[in-house]
Image (spheres, grey):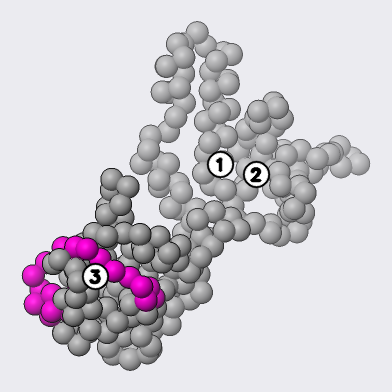
Amino acid sequence: MNFTSQQNREKFSEIGFLYVFDKLSADEKTEVWRCEQKRECKARVHLVNRKVVKTLNSHNHEPAAAKVAADQVITKIKKSAVETQESTCQVINESFPNQPDLKKLIRKKRNQINQAPANPITLAPLEIPEDYRIYVSEPGNSENFLLADSGPGAERILIFGRQRNLETVLTFDDFFMDGTFKIALNIFKQIYVVLAKKYGGIHPIFYALLPNKCIETYDILFSMIKVLVPNLHSKSITCDFEMAAFQNVAEIFPTAEI
């Protein structure tokens, strides 16, 4: 698949990676294309009649399926602007793929690169891969996503959330807590969510996977949260009237209005 850059240089895409033309072979039959990230990546492809016949070196970065789609749209817009008399709005509307197709493309490419492990059958031997323990907001910028783990066993509790929220949560006064059973994995009983109100909106802080809804489990959960944020306080807490959770919230946050 070929595109045109903003400098009108031709680009070639292959499985989510973009290449720019480098040179012709000595016999002028083979085109050598290099990764567009030439300063950091040494990957190359050889093309004959615009078909890949050879690859050289591996990429040292992730593919950019979304960028490929964007370049495809830009190239189509440029071509339509030159070759047709359609209005600006018509050119744009006809060039953009619909949103579901874009989402499908992104999911497909990510699934090709990051094959998820099979769903665990039992809780006790559960091992969480490193890629699922961190949150990457952008290349080179990552933080902890698995914030707390009660340890192996049938009563295991996992708490997920953004590492950066552990500091900002201290400035929040109003919290909302609730559990849901419908979307929990088979090996967990429920997903328990802690949200906070700030800046005119409601923000998720913690997502906890719980093995049951016993009072002892809620006690461990809120104790784990207090370890994560020792100085956490709240003026008000809104939660569903799950008696076991309600009692523990009152004990852990004695000054909060519930």
Question: Mark 3 vs mark 1: which is more N-terminal?
Answer: 1
The quarter of the rendered structure image containing the N terminus is top right
Closer mark to the observer between disc 3 and disc 1 = 3
State the image coordinates of residue 102 (x, y, percent, origin top left): 42, 41
Q: Mark 2 or 3, which is nearer the eye?
A: 3
- Residue drawn at 80 percent across, 40 percent down: 22
Q: Dot 1: within a 10 Å radius of its alpha carbon, few (fewer than 14), some, or many (20 or more) residues?
A: some
Q: Quadrant of residue 145?
A: bottom left
Res 205 visible:
yes
Residue 2 shown left or right of residue 207 in the figure: right
Residue at (83%, 39%) from the top-left corner?
23
Magenta segment boundaries in residue numbering? 228-249
Q: Position of residue 118 (x, y in %)?
A: 39, 74
Residue 257 place in picture, x, y as percent: 15, 66
Check contact, mark 1 vs mark 2: CB within 8 A.
yes
Mark 1 or mark 2, earlier in chain? 2
- The amino acid type found where label 3 is placed reads Tyr
Q: Which residue is mark 3?
A: 192
| Residue 250 vertical position relative to residue 74 in the rendered view, above or below | below
SS of the residue under disc 2 = strand
Quarter-of-image position of residue 156: bottom left
**From mark 3 to mark 1, how far is it between C-alphas?**
36 Å
On screen, residue 132 above or below 80: below
Q: How far apart in space, not on screen, are marks 2 and 3 (Cα)?
A: 42 Å
Give whichever of 29, 189 is nearer the camera. Answer: 189
Residue type, mark 2 in image: Leu
SS of the residue at dot 1?
A: helix
**Observer-nearest residue: 98 or 190?**
190
With respect to residue 103, does 175 lie above or below? Answer: below
Residue carrying label 2: 18
- Badge 1 amino acid: Lys
Q: Is residue 241 magenta?
A: yes
